[in-house]
Image: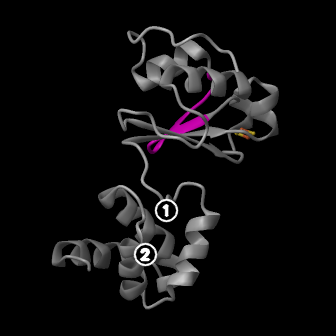
Amino acid sequence: MLTPEERVELDEMRSHYPTVRAASVSVLKWLQKHRGYLSDESMRDAADYLGLPVAELDGLATFYNLLFRQPVGERVICLCDSISCWMCGSDRIRRHIENRLAIRMGETSADGRFTLVPVVCLGNCDHAPSMIVGDELFHDLTPEKVDQILGLEDTGSHGGDHD
Ligand code: FES
């Protein structure tokens, strides 16, 4: 159930949208930000609040890459795997991240700090490869730049960029 405080904040946000449907993605994003991910309970809370069917919101959550129905790490790395980024070396970046964090695409690091997920084109193709971490867009990625962004400069290598 939404707390009174959550309801106040959601009411304020909803007032900026003409309809509840228009507000629904923002409501889901807000709940995710404050609760970590969109659990079944959060989906029910959002549906009750908006007066929309849970199934409709579930459809939205499935459609939007940046809405998570499963628990995720503190920082979610959304690495673009569409064509321009792929041509500019996103595969190498993926392998680098996987090796550094000892995870595969779709997994969360053992310390719970990072989750790595693929996303479709971020509209930043002229600066490929690109990724979003949290709310921030990063581009022209290199392995060194990735280490800097993720704060991994001093953690040493976990075996290089091999498959
Ligand atoms: S293909 Fe990656 S940003 Fe467009």
- How far apart are the alpha carbons under marks 2 and 1? 9 Å
Amino acid type at circle 1 is: Arg
The residue lying at 57 percent from left, 10 percent from top is 159
The residue lying at 60 percent from left, 55 percent from top is 65
The quadrant of the rendered image in which ligand 1 is seen is top right
Label 2 secondary element: helix
Residue range of the region highlighted in magenta in the rendering:
131-141
Amino acid type at circle 2 is: Met
Task: Pick whichever, 120 or 26, lies toward us.
Answer: 120
> Which percent across, then down, holds residue 127?
69, 29
Instruction: Tell whether position 132 is magenta.
Output: yes
Find out whether the residues at labels 2 and 1 contact each other: C-beta distance under 8 Å.
yes
Task: Pick whichever, 16 or 74, lies toward us.
Answer: 74
Residue 105 located left or right of residue 72? right
Residue that carries the numbered disc 2 in the rendered image: 43
Q: Is mark 2 within 8 Å of ligand 1?
A: no
The residue lying furthest to the left in this view is 4
> Which percent across, then down, holds residue 11?
30, 79
> Which percent across, then down, holds residue 27?
41, 71
Q: Tell me, for residue 69, which label it has, or none.
A: 1
Label 1 secondary element: loop
Instruction: Tell whether position 136 is magenta.
Output: yes
Q: Is residue 6 visible?
A: yes
* Crowdedness near tag 1: few (<14), some (14–19) or many (≥20) residues, C-alpha within 10 Å: some
Q: Is residue 15 visible?
A: no
The residue lying at 61 percent from left, 10 percent from top is 160
